[in-house]
Image (cartoon, helix red, strand yellow):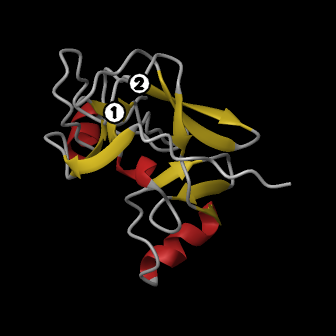
Amino acid sequence: MNTIATDRDFSLVKTSPVHGRGVFAKRTIPKGTRVFEYAGLRVSKTDLETDLTNGLTTMTFVMNLNKTTAIDGERGGNDARFINHSCNPNCEVLYFNETPYIYAMQEIQEGHELNFDYKLGFDSETILSIDQKKEWFPCNCGSENCRGTLVSN
């Protein structure tokens, strides 16, 4: 029997001071709460470049799932795709049976923006300088410990 996740009415999407749109708490979200699944089309990483070339995706909302598969939140995704990055996040992504879920790492007050560390990384063959990381993948989170880039390695 399939179960359908219910909308627990924790969040709303609106303009974000960090970047574009963001996800904000409609009410206090207790620490440890599973806010929602990061949903979208599961796509082979080898197909992503072709999909980009063919206009099927912009690659803006792609989340890594494993070595061969990514989730494209632009196609069949939900509000989770609008969660912005922060170097000092209040949420984290936990995976269960290859399904990513967004969890509150701390109590999140009504009106506060939800965020998680994107932890962008590259294979061992790709070496970027810190200046390249900051130029190509800039961070706008504004936290005190901001590393200036979405790249974690």
Position of 57 with respect to 94 (left or right) is: left
Position of 54 with respect to 42 (left or right) is: left
**Vertical placement of 79 versus 150: above or below?**
below
User: Which of the 4 quarters of the picture holds residue 69?
Assistant: bottom right
Q: Position of residue 105 (x, y in %)?
A: 46, 18
Position of 32 with respect to 136 (left or right) is: right
Q: Residue at x 27, y 27 (%)?
A: 110
Element at label 2: loop
Of labels 2 and 1, earlier in sequence is 2
> Residue most toward the right?
1
**Residue sitting nearer the eye, 103 or 139:** 103
**Tag 1: amino acid:** Leu
Q: Position of residue 26 (x, y in %)?
A: 31, 36
**Residue sitting nearer the eye, 80 or 119:** 80
User: Which of the 4 quarters of the picture holds residue 57?
Assistant: bottom left
Q: Residues within 10 Å of mark 1 (few under 14, many from 20)?
A: many
**Residue sitting nearer the eye, 40 or 146:** 40
Position of 123 with respect to 30 (left or right) is: right
**Vertical placement of 20 versus 147: above or below?**
below
**Tag 2: amino acid:** Ile
**Quadrant where the C terminus lies?**
top left
User: Which of the 4 quarters of the picture holds residue 24?
Assistant: top left
> Which labelled disc corresponds to residue 29?
2
**Quadrant where the N terminus lies?**
bottom right
User: Contact (CB < 8 A) between labels 2 and 1?
Assistant: yes
Q: Position of residue 145 (x, y in %)?
A: 23, 15
**Vertical placement of 88 versus 153: above or below?**
above
Q: Residues within 10 Å of mark 2 (few under 14, many from 20)?
A: many
Check disc 1 and report the residue beneath it: 114
Q: CA distance from mark 2 to mark 1?
A: 10 Å
